[in-house]
Image (tube, grey):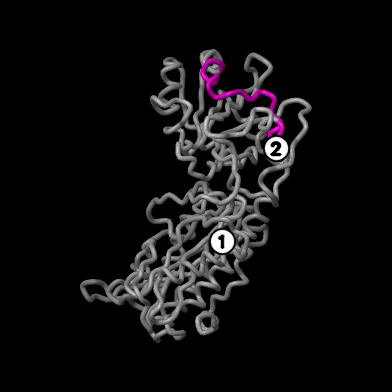
Amino acid sequence: MSDLGARSYLRPRPGYVIVACAAITILCGAIAAPPSLILGQTPAEFAQRRERLRSALDGILLVPSSVTTTDRERFRADNDLVYLTGLELSSGMLALLPNGAEGDAKVLLFVNRRWGGPTLDRVKEDSGLSDVYDYREAWERLKPIIGRIPKVYVAGSRADRTAMEPDGGLEAYVRAQQPDGRVLNGNPLIHNLRVVKSDGEIANIKAAVRATVEGMRRGAARIRPGTSELSVEGAVLAGFREGNAPREAFPCIVGAGPNSVDLHHDPTERSMRSGETVVVDIGAEVHYYAADITRTFPVGGRFSPRARELYNAVLQVQRDCEQYVKPGKTTWGELDSYARAQLRQSRLRGTTSSNDLETLDRFLTHYIGHYIGMDVHDVGQSASPIPVGSVLAIEPGVYIPAENIGIRIEDNYLVTETGLVRLSEALPRDADDIERMVRRR
């Protein structure tokens, strides 16, 4: 999925969930570790992440949960709590205290049971944490602690909309309690850890990739003249479920003909026409980890000569980018510049709205790629070298509105010591194979 524009990609999943989210913890002392609630990762792994985070703290860290709706609508937990604990909780908050803080408790977890959340004993059993309280006790317990610690970090994607303090955001509340202290953004502390993936995380991403490949195959089989974009989306989602993915990582993008140049096109009832290209950009989510794969298909089963030459040019850039990345050395900015230079060197030209001919780099209107993880556009610094152990998407494309042609090819990669490993290799990308996918019924 191209990284232009910001959208919300939270989707509910079926079944019983204790959902919500929030924060950071360290298990202190000899606490028995419960089974992880997020498959593919062990309790020891979560504890190690928490220890690494805690060792870097010079203040208290607060992370609020998601906000529960009164109609009991199911929702997805924020990623940071899941990353650090494996827990899904109803609205609440967790506080992590630094070394040197007074008192024995170094982590306090507050749970809101108003809308049918788990019992405190159940949370203790699942988390291994001993200091678990009703969220209504939060500020009674935290206020004296915050008053003694000069720095307070507030983390979480919804730190400004927390159920913990209905009269305002958490950050504003903390500032009111500690007017002489420093209230800082805690997200970077967590997000720096999330860039490099563990074996368990990689296993979940691979599972999401497999489900996405199945969805893409199902979607390709639906592409024919007269079929709507919505019909293709329906086939994709059926493939996700067949691949045991309970939800999508972001809303499906399906755009044919003039819609293929819209980077984040929502599928419509528009019927596809023979000779058009259709961009299908999709991603399943498995155990909180995303995939993000794009293919461009010819409606009718054959690329037009123009579409084929553009497709092959984009594919060559993707292959060149795969070889260009040097783990631990190449930055995203360097990779993006390289991709644009490769397009600029192509003999092909695109037509502008004023009927001028321009080099193809003029028609790459988004960044060349992004990290993948718990967020489909995962956390990580674009100015830093791409590290070993990260997972990324490379997605070159050209979008020529004057010609009603959009082409995008996107695959997912694991960064290893020796280079990139294409996790989505099971999905064809050569033009001839793409045509066969559409013709296969």
Q: Note whether 100 is above or below 348 in the view shown.
A: above
Residue at x 56%, y 38% (from the top left corner): 190
Residue 185 seen in the current view: yes
Q: Nearer the viewer, residue 268 or 387?
A: 268
Amino acid type, callout 1: Val
Q: What is the secondary structure assignment of the residue under circle 2?
A: helix
- The residue that mark 2 highlights is 48
Residue 212, by quadrant, is bottom right
Residue 42 numbered mark, or none: none
Where residue 339 appears, x then y in whole percent? 45, 65
Amino acid type, callout 2: Gln
Where residue 103 appears, x then y in whole percent? 66, 14
Where residue 150 appears, x then y in whole percent? 51, 17
Q: Nearer the viewer, residue 227 or 323?
A: 227
Q: Note whether 435 is above or below 94 in the view shown.
A: below
Chain-order first, disc 2 or disc 1: 2
Q: What is the secondary structure assignment of the residue under circle 1?
A: loop
From the viewer's perspective, tell me whether residue 46 is left or right of residue 62: right
Residue at x 58%, y 72% (from the top left corner): 427
Q: Residue furthest left?
A: 354
Q: Note whether 170 is above or below 208 in the view shown.
A: above
Residue at x 70%, y 52% (from the top left corner): 199
Magenta highlight range: 125-141
Report how far apart the C-alphas of labels 2 and 1 lie in the structure.
Answer: 29 Å
From the viewer's perspective, tell me whether residue 48 is left or right of residue 164: right
Q: Nearer the viewer, residue 96 or 222?
A: 222
Residue 139 is covered by the magenta coloring: yes
- The residue that mark 1 highlights is 325
Residue 94, by quadrant, is top right
Residue 423 is covered by the magenta coloring: no
Q: Nearer the viewer, residue 413 or 374?
A: 374
Residue at x 61%, y 30% (from the top left corner): 56
